Image: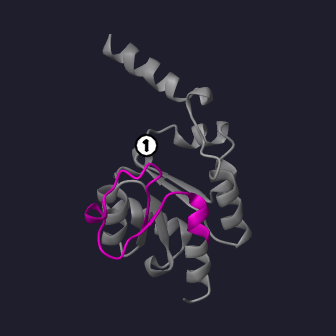
């Protein structure tokens, strides 16, 4: 019984109609690629994340995908971020990680020497919930000026 349940659950995760892609995702990903940046997905997710991103027409926007089930470490563990840095051939100080969890994404990225940007689409975080110095955005459109400032050395 449990095996059948988990197999069915995994099948349902792969049904693209069950997923909502925020309208700002595609333009933001395209804008990052137009800037010549290496873009990766770092996610606490199941083995089939690359296949799901492919079926959602998102995989083409990423240079690599770090699914925790494949890497063997979940955020906030620094090893998943280190693996991503290796794939990007990047210095941590040159990287921005965008995520929606303070502990896993922001603190995890910081532990690996990476700047974290918190995306809070629903304004669920109070200012005291966010570590000092962390930029908070409510849309991926707001990420582009942050990236541009970083690229321009500001």
Residue 2 place in picture, x, y as percent: 31, 15
Horizontally, residue 89 falls left or right of residue 35, namely left
Residue 120 highlighted magenta (yes or no): yes
Q: Which residue is mark 1?
A: 45
Depth order, front residue of 51/12: 12
Q: Residue at x 54, y 89 (%)?
A: 154
Depth check: give the residue in front, 45 or 145.
145
The answer to which of 126 and 83 lies nearer the viewer is 126
Q: Is residue 42 magenta?
A: no
Q: Position of residue 105 (x, y in %)?
A: 37, 59
Within 10 Å of the Cα at label 1, are there few (<14), some (14-19), or many (20+) other Cα atoms? some
Q: Quadrant of residue 102?
A: bottom left
Vertically, is 135 above or below 18? below
149 with respect to 92 (left or right)? right
Q: Residue at x 60, y 45 (%)?
A: 22
Residue 78 visible in the picture:
no
Q: Would you say 126 lies left or right of 121 here? A: left
Residue toward you, 74 or 32: 32
Q: How is the image coloured?
A: one colour
Q: Is residue 62 above or below residue 69?
A: below
Q: Is residue 67 visible?
A: yes
Residue furthest out toward the top: 1
Outermost residue to the bottom: 153
Residue extending farthest right: 34
Magenta range: 117-144
Residue at screen point 43% across, 43% down? 45
Quadrant of the drawing holding the N terminus: top left
Q: Quadrant of residue 15?
A: top right
Where is residue 29? Give x, y as percent: 65, 58
Image quadrant where residue 129 sits: bottom left
Q: Secondary structure at mark 1?
A: loop
| Residue in the image at 39% along x and 59% along y | 80
């Amino acid at each position: 019984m449990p095996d059948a349940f988990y197999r069915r659950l995994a099948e349902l995760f792969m049904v693209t109609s069950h997923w909502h892609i925020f309208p700002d995702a595609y333009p933001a990903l395209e804008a990052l690629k137009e800037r010549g940046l290496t873009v990766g997905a770092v996610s606490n997710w199941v083995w089939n994340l690359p296949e799901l991103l492919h079926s959602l027409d998102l995989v083409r926007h990423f240079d690599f995908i770090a699914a925790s089930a494949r890497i063997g470490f979940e955020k906030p563990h620094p090893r998943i971020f280190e693996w991503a840095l290796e794939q990007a051939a990047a210095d941590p100080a040159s990287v921005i990680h965008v995520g929606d969890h303070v502990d896993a994404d922001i603190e995890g990225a910081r532990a690996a020497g990476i700047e974290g940007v918190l995306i809070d689409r629903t304004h669920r975080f109070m200012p005291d919930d966010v570590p000092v110095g962390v930029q908070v955005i409510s849309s991926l459109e707001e990420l582009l000026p942050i990236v541009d400032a970083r690229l321009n050395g500001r």
